[in-house]
Amino acid sequence: METKTLDDAITHRKLILIQLKQGLIERLNLYQTVDQIDDDTPLFGSGLKLDSVDATEVFVLLDETFGIRVAEGQEPSYMRSINTLATFIIENQPKPSA
């Protein structure tokens, strides 16, 4: 049973990563494919080189795609890399209604 849960978590994370990368590519007009963006790629600085305007687009992406509204003043450490953003999504995404 634990293996199934772990497999489900891994599959879910992979789907979130793909959906996140696709959303970033589309919203920010990045000239990369999903396969070209490593999971540990930084969002700012030497990575995807996002700026403050792009950060606003990431907030919109989180809301529209994943149903997550980021609170004003929330610690921004989740915006370090693709992986940290995926973890943030997994931890904060609303659970589907049964």
Image (spheres, helix red, strand yellow):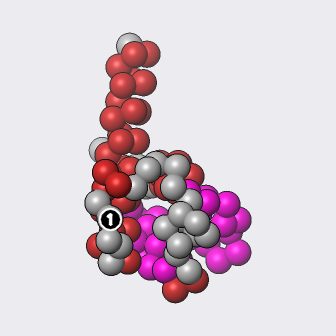
Characterize the magenta stretch by its predominant secondary structure: helix
Compare residues 71 and 3 and report the one nearer the observer. 3
Q: Is mark 1 on a helix, strand or loop?
A: loop
Q: Residue at x 44, y 79 (%)?
A: 57
Q: Give the range drawn in magenta.
A: 54-81
User: Where is residue 34 drawn, in percent x and y?
Assistant: 31, 56
Q: Which residue lies furthest to the bottom in this view?
A: 53
Q: Is residue 27 visible?
A: no
Q: Tell me the quadrant of the picture where the N terminus can be found.
A: top left
Name which quarter of the figure residue 42 lies in.
bottom right
Compared across the picture, whether 97 is left or right of 43 comes to left
Which of the 4 image quarters holds residue 60?
bottom left
- Identify which amino acid the numbered label 1 is placed on: Gln
Q: From the viewer's perspective, is residue 82 above or below residue 56?
A: above
Whether residue 76 is visible to the viewer of this picture, yes or no, is yes
Residue drawn at (53%, 63%) of the image: 47
Q: In this view, does 29 lie above or below 96?
A: below
x then y, percent, for residue 58: 46, 73
Q: Within 10 Å of the Cα at label 1, are there few (<14), some (14-19), or many (20+) other Cα atoms?
A: some
Label tally: 1
Task: Look at the image and say whether residue 63 sits in the magenta stretch.
Answer: yes
Placement of the C terminus among the 4 image quadrants? top left
Residue sitting at x 40%, y 16%: 3
Q: Mark 1 points at which residue?
A: 32
Give the residue displayed 40% in from the left and 65% down from the top.
Answer: 67
Residue 53 location in percent, x, y? 52, 86
